[in-house]
């Protein structure tokens, strides 16, 4: 959930970017059953509106998933028989990671609808437990649905009138649009949106483990060991990779925005400073491991996406849903094959933006990338810079360019070189990764050309099974408690200037 709200002092204007994605694909395919998503929008009847009740009535935007077309049809009576669905103006997306049939959150929502005379969720159905955070465009509360005790949610409540007066409607709408399309184990689930004449509310999952900022402060010497840093960083990389695939530049990565779920895995929050780009123009290519090694090795040099393809076009496997605009690559040295040895070729789909630019000045001062500070314009490479700052802080308990005040901090980001403290001892592979992520020239920064693939192939992540991250034992599993122990309670100091 978006459990902390950004401080955004001034108005906003932004340029749309063109962002692609990068994710792993093996030629040994597996049969996957994708769940089909059902959507319906439920609004109060004219009779209810005419009644003029004191109680605000909120519309319910249902998002549920089933395992197949057949089960989707068979579950109509069980799941939506108690209320009437209407066509949604939101495009339909397959969400294989959705757990609508087993999630306690979805069960609680369906339970409330099952006994509701109006088939509506109203303010009376929400029990507000405590305030979690307050920010520029809304306030976040810990809430329960009455009749479903023990099932908690995070509710971000926004005043529509205030949003209109302060010209923040576009920012609030963007955050909702982003949450609506997310379907990833390390990103929030938007259960429903609630609307009244005055209020707008986003109901998402609540993470009882607090955030990584507070968790780090509870560690010995207020820092994580290398195994913990590798665990949290790998899950963040997977989440950023997915966001870039969806055309979203996060732009506000920091420990305060990484929440810990009850199972110890992470969830990125806060998308009100994110930039959503045009998904219809990804520049995609499918490369072998040999090609990736070549690109990763030469990324900091003179790599150009427009060089001629050294192999025939028949060797270039391109997704049918994309328009290829980047050539295929292969090194001159072919991998040696042992006689009788069958080799599975690993392929990578790469679509990282190259010419995307935004002039917005957004983020948290200590995490701002040099290109943001200098106003030169920035793209998705800012997320990889913030990943380097994030890793540095987890290892050392502080950020590398922090100054006496914000002005000195920004000056250090642009002009000062990266230095590592002598203590604690950190592996050379970790330092090498941080160094490559904190290259001030975004064109030479690790991840700027082939995205997360270059980062995932770094030696720091040797031994990480990217396909089974959710099965990895977390370094910390929170204990059930009412004491949230999270900086979600505090005002967020993120900035947005233009």
Image (cartoon, rainbow, N blue to C red):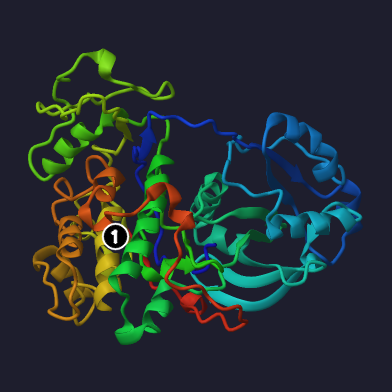
Q: Is residue 140 visible?
A: yes
- Quarter of image, res 313: top left
The spot of residue 46 in percent (x, y) is 87, 47
Residue bearing the label numbered 1: 387
Q: Is residue 464 above or below residue 299?
A: below
Residue at 19% in and 27% down: 329
Count of residue discs: 1
Judge the density around disc 1: few (<14), some (14-19), many (≥20) Cα neighbours within 10 Å: many
Q: Is residue 13 visible?
A: no
Q: Is residue 330 above or below residue 255?
A: above
Quadrant, the N terminus: bottom right
The spot of residue 32 in percent (x, y) is 55, 33
Closest to the observer, 51 or 24: 24
Closest to the observer, 365 or 498: 365
Q: Tag 1, which secondary structure?
A: helix
Query: Is 130 on the left or on the right of 121, as rendered?
Result: left
Query: Is 326 on the left or on the right of 435, as rendered?
Result: right
The spot of residue 120 in percent (x, y) is 82, 54
Closest to the observer, 203 or 456: 456
Q: Is residue 27 above or below residue 234?
A: above
Q: Residue furthest front?
A: 340
Quadrant, the C terminus: bottom left
The spot of residue 181 in percent (x, y) is 54, 44
- Quarter of image, res 39: top right
Closest to the observer, 115 or 66: 66
Query: Is 301 on the left or on the right of 433, as rendered?
Result: left
Query: Is 144 on the left or on the right of 120, as rendered?
Result: left
- Quarter of image, res 75: top right
């Amino acid at each position: 959930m978006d459990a902390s709200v950004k401080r955004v002092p001034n108005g906003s204007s932004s340029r749309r970017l063109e962002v692609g994605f990068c994710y792993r694909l093996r030629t040994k395919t597996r049969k996957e059953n994708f769940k089909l998503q059902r959507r319906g929008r439920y609004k109060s009847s004219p009779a209810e509106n005419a009644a003029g009740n004191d109680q605000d009535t909120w519309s319910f935007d249902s998002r549920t998933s089933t395992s197949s077309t057949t089960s989707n049809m068979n579950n109509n009576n069980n799941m939506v028989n108690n209320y009437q669905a209407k066509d949604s103006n939101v495009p339909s997306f397959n969400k294989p990671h959705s757990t609508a049939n087993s999630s306690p959150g979805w069960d609680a929502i369906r339970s409330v609808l099952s006994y509701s005379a109006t088939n509506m969720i109203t303010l009376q159905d929400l029990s507000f437990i405590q305030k979690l955070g307050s920010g520029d465009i809304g306030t976040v509360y810990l809430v329960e649905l009455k009749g479903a005790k023990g099932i908690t949610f995070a509710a971000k409540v926004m005043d529509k009138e205030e949003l209109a007066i302060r010209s923040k409607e576009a920012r609030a709408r963007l955050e909702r649009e982003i949450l609506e399309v997310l379907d990833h184990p390390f990103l929030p689930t938007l259960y429903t949106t609630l609307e009244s004449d005055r209020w707008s509310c986003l109901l998402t999952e609540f993470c009882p483990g607090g955030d990584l900022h507070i968790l780090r402060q509870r560690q010995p010497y207020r820092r994580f060991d290398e195994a913990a840093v590798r665990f949290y960083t790998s899950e963040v990389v997977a989440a950023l990779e997915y966001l870039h695939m969806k055309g979203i530049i996060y732009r506000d990565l920091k420990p305060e925005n990484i929440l810990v779920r009850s199972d110890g895995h992470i969830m990125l929050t806060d998308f009100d400073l994110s930039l959503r780009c045009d998904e219809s123009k990804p520049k995609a290519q499918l490369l072998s491991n040999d090609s990736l090694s070549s690109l990763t090795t030469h990324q900091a040099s003179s790599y150009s996406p427009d060089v001629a393809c050294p192999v025939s076009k028949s060797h270039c496997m391109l997704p049918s849903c994309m328009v290829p605009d980047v050539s295929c690559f292969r090194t001159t040295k072919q991998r040696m094959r042992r006689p009788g040895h069958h080799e599975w070729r690993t392929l990578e789909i790469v679509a990282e933006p190259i010419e995307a630019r935004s002039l917005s000045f957004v983020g948290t001062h200590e995490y701002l990338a040099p290109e943001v500070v200098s106003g030169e314009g920035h793209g998705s490479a800012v997320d990889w810079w913030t990943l380097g700052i994030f890793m540095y802080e987890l290892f050392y308990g502080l950020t590398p360019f922090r100054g006496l005040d914000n002005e000195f901090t920004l000056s250090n980001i642009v002009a000062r070189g990266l230095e590592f403290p002598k203590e604690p001892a950190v592996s050379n592979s970790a330092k090498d990764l941080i160094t490559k992520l904190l290259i001030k020239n975004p064109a030479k920064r690790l991840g700027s050309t082939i995205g997360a693939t270059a980062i995932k192939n770094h030696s720091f992540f040797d031994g990480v099974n990217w396909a089974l991250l959710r099965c990895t034992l977390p370094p910390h599993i929170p204990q059930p408690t009412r004491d949230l122990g999270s900086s979600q309670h505090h005002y967020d100091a993120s900035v947005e200037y233009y």
